[in-house]
Image (cartoon, rainbow, N blue to C red):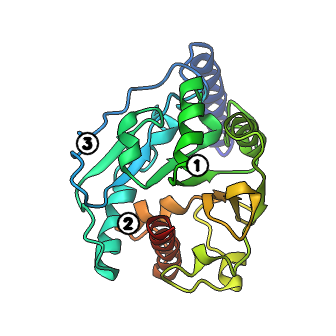
Amino acid sequence: MTRRPARTFGIACLLLVIASLALAQRGGGFGGRFRFRQQILPNAPYDGKFTFVRVNYESTPDGYWYGGQPAWAHGYPVAEENLMRIMNEVSYLGAHAEAFNSIRFDDPELSKYPIAYVIEPDWWAITDSEIQALREYMLKGGFVIVDDFKVLFGRGGIGGGGWPAFETLMKRVMPEGRFVDLDAADPVFHSFFDIKATELRDFPQAYIPGKPQFLGLYEDNDTSKRLLMVVNFNTDISQYWEWSGRGLRPFDDTNEAYKLGVNYLIYGLTH
């Protein structure tokens, strides 16, 4: 009698493993064909008011691991909806609070918007037209926020291609570009809230182990010039925005993530 529960548990685990292997072979597991096409909300027509723009893209075959969603859509549109509510509370921006546009980089409409947000770029099956459009967007004054990718754990499982995949992508976009670690004195961290060096070093993590890194790509690789792109690596800032209404994380940690998001938006609008 005392051995039956353990035996039953062992059999259940074995069946689970077999089922998982079968699912993977059929293309239903990580990196397989278990995917769906994300419903994209209708874009609000341009009217001069600030509208949050998330970049959508074609994911690599293994980029549909989170419930079958494409990598670009994780947290969409709850994360940006919550951020815009905070933005309108703490500033006079008057942004669209219920319009969350999603545009590809090679869509000409993107030129109407000063800031573009993209997540999980290590699962981005970038096209030649997107490469050219992303480069032109930044050089013409656009500011790009990159979020939510992490230290490499291996493709087909957790973590995508990590920094190497992103670096390879960006070398195609801007071969002369060089990413540098952002100093806490950089204007992007003081464009609205003053974020201290200690706050950046100990930035709260939602679920990713290790320390987050904040990197930047500057115009002409000159740190005294305009920041073209800010990168949140080995962290997921938008996860805090998404979860802030669910009570899943401490208020203090969530506030730090909102401060960073507000600063990025203000910087992009003023530089």
Task: State the CA–CA distance, disc 1 to disc 3.
Answer: 25 Å
Q: For numbered disc 3, what is the local secondary structure? A: loop
Q: Residue 43: which numbered mark, if any?
A: 3
| In this view, 247 is above or below 155 | below
From the viewer's perspective, is the residue at label 1 or at label 3 nearer?
Answer: 1
Q: Earlier in the sequence, mark 1 or mark 2?
A: 2
Q: Earlier in the sequence, mark 3 or mark 2?
A: 3
Task: Name which residue lies at 43% across and 55% down.
Answer: 114
How far from the left and from the top, in percent, is residue 163?
75, 46
| In this view, 197 is above or below 264 | below
Quarter assignment of residue 200: bottom right
How far from the left and from the top, in percent, is residue 24?
61, 20
Q: Amino acid at mark 1?
A: Leu
Q: Give 24 or 171, whichever is nearer the viewer.
A: 171
From the viewer's perspective, is the residue at label 3 or at label 2 nearer?
Answer: 3
Q: Residue 139: which numbered mark, if any?
A: 1
Task: Name which residue lies at 67% across and 57% down.
Answer: 219
Q: For numbered disc 2, what is the local secondary structure? A: helix
Quarter assignment of residue 98: bottom left
Identify the residue under disc 2: 83
Q: Is residue 89 visible?
A: yes
Disc 3 residue crowd, few under 14, some 14–19, many 20+, Cα 10 Å: few
